[in-house]
Amino acid sequence: MEVTKEIAEQYLLQMYQIRVFEEQAEKSYMAGKIHGTMHLSIGQEASAVGSVSALGPKDLILSTHRGHGHCIAKGADLKLMMAEFYGKANGYCRGRGGSMHIADVASGNLGANGVVGGGIPMAVGVGLGLKMQNEGKILLSFFGDGAASTGAFHESMTLSVLYQVPVVYVCENNQYAMSFPSNKWTTSEGLASFAACYGMPGKSVDGNDLLAVLEATEEAVEHVRNGNGPALVVCDTYRWRGHSKSDRNRYRSQEEIDAWKEKDPIERFKNHMIEKKTLTIDDIEKIKAQADADIENARLFAESSPDPDVSTLEEGVYAPW
Amino acid sequence: MEVTKEIAEQYLLQMYQIRVFEEQAEKSYMAGKIHGTMHLSIGQEASAVGSVSALGPKDLILSTHRGHGHCIAKGADLKLMMAEFYGKANGYCRGRGGSMHIADVASGNLGANGVVGGGIPMAVGVGLGLKMQNEGKILLSFFGDGAASTGAFHESMTLSVLYQVPVVYVCENNQYAMSFPSNKWTTSEGLASFAACYGMPGKSVDGNDLLAVLEATEEAVEHVRNGNGPALVVCDTYRWRGHSKSDRNRYRSQEEIDAWKEKDPIERFKNHMIEKKTLTIDDIEKIKAQADADIENARLFAESSPDPDVSTLEEGVYAPW
Amino acid sequence: MVREITYLEAVREAMTQEMERDPKVFLIGEDVGLYGGAFQVSYGMLEKFGPERIVDTPITELGIAGAATGAALVGMRPIAEIMFMDFTTLASEQLVNQAAKLRFMFGGRATDPMVLRTPAGSGTGAAEHHSQSFENWFVHVPGLKVVMPTTPYDVKGLLIESIRDDNPVVFIEHKLLYKSKGPVPEEMYTIPLGKADVKRAGRDLTIVATGVMVQRSLAAADQLAQEGIDIEIVDPRTLRPLDTETIIASVKKTGKVLIVHEAVKTGGFGGELAAVIAESEAFGYLEAPILRLAGKEVPIPYNRNLEYHAVPQVENIIEKARELAQLKV
Amino acid sequence: MVREITYLEAVREAMTQEMERDPKVFLIGEDVGLYGGAFQVSYGMLEKFGPERIVDTPITELGIAGAATGAALVGMRPIAEIMFMDFTTLASEQLVNQAAKLRFMFGGRATDPMVLRTPAGSGTGAAEHHSQSFENWFVHVPGLKVVMPTTPYDVKGLLIESIRDDNPVVFIEHKLLYKSKGPVPEEMYTIPLGKADVKRAGRDLTIVATGVMVQRSLAAADQLAQEGIDIEIVDPRTLRPLDTETIIASVKKTGKVLIVHEAVKTGGFGGELAAVIAESEAFGYLEAPILRLAGKEVPIPYNRNLEYHAVPQVENIIEKARELAQLKV
Ligand SMILES: Cc1ncc(C[n+]2csc(CCOP(=O)(O)OP(=O)(O)O)c2C)c(N)n1
Ligand SMILES: Cc1ncc(C[n+]2csc(CCOP(=O)(O)OP(=O)(O)O)c2C)c(N)n1
Ligand SMILES: [Mg+2]
Ligand SMILES: [Mg+2]
């Protein structure tokens, strides 16, 4: 797959933004400026950027608890995102949702989700709605290997195929559901093979290879956009960080983590672009600097933003509002 | 597969008992002596008797809302069963459960279930328990094609394979979940093929051919009893009656029903046994007469049994009792 | 004279008229198409609207609730049917965690205008798994509205209003009421959510009843009237938001209150009603303890007599109301 | 002096000792093994008991509840862990329709001795999907018992008793209490289910509080004592069956009652408590309305301040209790 310089820059910028954003979020958390918990996707950037890049601007995504990458790939405003991490009044959710619930329905991001598998049943409904509205929009619905074991997955796949909804399902198999190794019950190929049982195309792909993810998702998008019903793409990848802030990494070895770090999706894309002579080292440094600056701006914005007024606590539960 | 005369008589008697029992229940219902609703399995007798006959006496079953056949195949006392249909104090559930909840835990019938898919998650637990108790017992867990679309099915299959529980799953695909045709989302072969995704053997079989069901289930039982984890058998069959007492049969044609009646599992077994010279017409008439008498006794018992005393209403919710 | 139709027909008419008016409305659930729904509520609607808008599903309660939640999120107005309220136990994750919270959790950037309809209650001999009443579960969830109509007239007005409401609404029907008849205008009309209805005015004591218990309380009141006991009956109709004003006003007037519902007493909506009264200014007007008459502490049994005695019947209401009328603190 | 351990250690010790005593007991849930559970409750137990008795599951809440229900049905004594109470919405079908009803529905021919443990409550910044309190859902279900301990001592005695109980028990832990310390004997002991505990004796008013609100109420009472307001605090400990006797006796003594819980007020357990009091003989002793202080009518928000103000804090209890102390009807 060939990409232009402009496109390559965009992909790389988004991957850097994800990485740097999460590194910053982690630092702010350590510094006590962000509370609660968060689920970092460092190491999985190619899966987010590669898959979302196969969409058109009017298409939609539904995300997960590990959704920062999806959100940024969908073009979120980093300032509003970071402000939400800080729980600020001008964050995406007015400080109500935090890291696990960022959404921007107007721009096509239908939201992250604190419930594993919580987005998949909604994807069916979104698909039904899009089909009835018939404006050519499609949905990309993310979920993890862990979510694939939930009943929600099975019911949703069954319904999706039955109604031939315009949904690309992207399963990010990062090898673990918290501490539970996915290979205890399946593999990326195994996950893809479920698709055939439901009656839709399914493909497993190297999730750390942005262009491979893009290509597989584009294929799925074409299938879906042509009215052939849903399709499944499984991205084989790995999270470098612990599951969340409470993780002590007891269930995996440093060697395993290191081996996957060798497969860093950002390094891989960089090297590939250098090899292809699409980007120079200089270009790349500029992009990285841009990402750093974007995140620093986001941080400054978040830190200088106001907290929500406690008097507004009970607002917004019901519409109208 | 060869069967002795004695065995053939037993199978035929049980199939007749199921059929006559349900015909009687239907009559009593029409006469206003039984209330509520019931789900008749007339036409599916081979699936119940064939599969349960592959078990040993200490093995267990878990049944469904369409469970009269399973119950009789497992050797239920027809009198206590009929008394339960009549809601009597000496029925299997002391009149508390009715047709949809008959159980006899002591004799290995862990119960019918009013919730579609409600028994499947329990099967995992029963399997875990049996495995820990290590007495060589196995469980046969029934469910329908409709139950196979529930999230409960997916979670339970995943867990069953993971823990290698000693459970034979028997899916009775009678072509409909209420009015929903299973072929809108799968087939008997399709259902069996799910097994491979989970990592267990799965086989689809002509569910109106008692000996075919028996053979397939025996194979599954052997697999399971040898400690190889669960196995799935899908019986392709058909219910002659409406889904329940509220069914108007709008979703299927009389031709379809008639075509399946041609494949009557009882006629089929009878003819096969006559052909094989295992049974004579005379033998068969005696067996049928026996079944008629058994059910008539059950009816008389039920009708002459006392209603539960209303003063006992609040008993038995909690143990001890 | 206004035309009379059944409660069931009122549900169907509300859905039909609203679907004719608004192409965003559709119905999804098990056997809602050709079968017409387990209780024939949607019978004939498939022929009228086709399978794209009368959507049959396999047995996937979580999926149904999710489909409605998701479709509403992108601007549709789905009506999801869960065949028996007992099976909302399978759908509640989507309803409670997702639909109810989307708007708040996303800082107001989402709207989820869906209705989840489901028949509740006992009395059909369907036993433990087809007879439960979980309204208080959903009353307990901010973000949801909970409607529980008791007459054909209220059904039509409240269901149309629920469909038009921009929030997820749990609309609870009662199986035993499906065949009850009453006057219902043919034209569309709405009844605001959160408005109670005084179904009978009276002086001596107030009964606050829900679901089929409104009808039973009315029957009880008629009989007690002959003994000179004059009962006021308040039907909240919407349980969340609750019209506390009407309830409190009635209790202030009569000084005595009996709460009647079918759901199991412990942990039920009657507790909420009692608490709302006991913490209000009506407390000072109370001339007797606040009494509850509700479902017994048992699953709903199969046997006809046992089932009958598991929930309040007219004679139980009479007895309890009479007792209350005679009580003096 | 009795040894002090944390609430969390008390949960672990109860499970460990009971597993050592009874080979039928096992633990099943997500990440309960190597990970030690999301809150480290079962940390170290895998090493002690092995993967056959500390059973890790994929993400399958319905499956977990079903596994426990089924295993109990054949004589085991499973402890199922649902990682956050929010996810009992996915498990409730098995718990409510199956486990709770098996015995009754089968006419007494089944016993289902399982425990479903789950941490509830807010205060950790985990927002809408990881902070809910659904105790009243399960209180509403005959066949279940519901336990909600508030001290390490109670945790140990009540959890051992719950495991030994022959019925399905929902055992609700509070995340914020996990690190609280208190005296706990090393030897095994049990506390009967259905016995409330008067956590503080007082004359002026009664607070009935559950979960983390017991601790907050104790803190409030200490401060109010300095103003001369003497508060009695009743901790029901078991919500179903409820020790109405102790509660009613306390209210009769003080004449005033404030109910405090974290769960959303509307439809919550406070309603049940208020109703039990308002319909009892304590009614005649009441010198003021029955007040409830409970969670606001919102999902639990993320922002620290908003989250803090979404549920009762010590200062809110002080304010409300003071108001009540001064009230006269
Ligand atoms: C229904 C549910 N069960 C449990 C959890 C707790 N939990 C949060 S993330 C997670 C693991 C999810 O695994 P996976 O789907 O593979 O996504 P990943 O975290 O690996 O990105 C678990 C168990 C939850 N949030 N929701
Ligand atoms: C969870 C749930 N949803 C819906 C129903 C209503 N219902 C009872 S039986 C049935 C169809 C079941 O189909 P299947 O599993 O194929 O069994 P069959 O009736 O064909 O034997 C339905 C929808 C139910 N009992 N439980
Ligand atoms: Mg994962
Ligand atoms: Mg079927």
Image: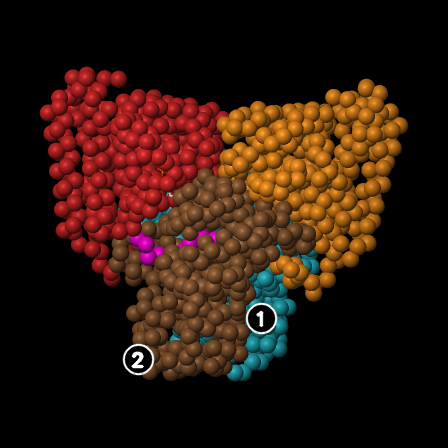
Chain colours: A red, B orange, C cyan, D brown
How far from the left and from the top, in percent, is residue C166?
A: 35, 49
Is residue C153 visible in the rendered image? The answer is no
**Residue type, label 2:** Gln
How far from the left and from the top, in percent, is residue D149?
A: 45, 62
Badge 2 sits on which subunit? D
Instruction: Verify CB contact (< 8 Å) between mark 1 and mark 2.
Output: no
The residue positioned 52% from the left and 26% from the top of the image is B196
How far from the left and from the top, in percent, is residue C136?
A: 48, 58
From which residue to which does the magenta span run? D116-125
Give the residue pinned by disc 1. C221
The residue positioned 47% from the left and 30% from the top of the image is A162
Q: Secondary structure at mark 2?
A: loop
The residue positioned 81% from the left and 50% from the top of the image is B301
- The reply to whether the residue tagged 2 has its Cβ within 8 angstroms of ligand 1 is no
Residue in the foreground of this view, choosing between D130 and D196: D196
The count of marks equals 2
Badge 1 sits on which subunit? C
- The alpha-carbon separation of the residues under discs 1 and 2 comes to 52 Å
Magenta run includes residue D118: yes
How far from the left and from the top, in percent, is residue D200?
A: 42, 75
Measured along the vertical axis of the image, is residue A175 above or below residue B94?
A: above
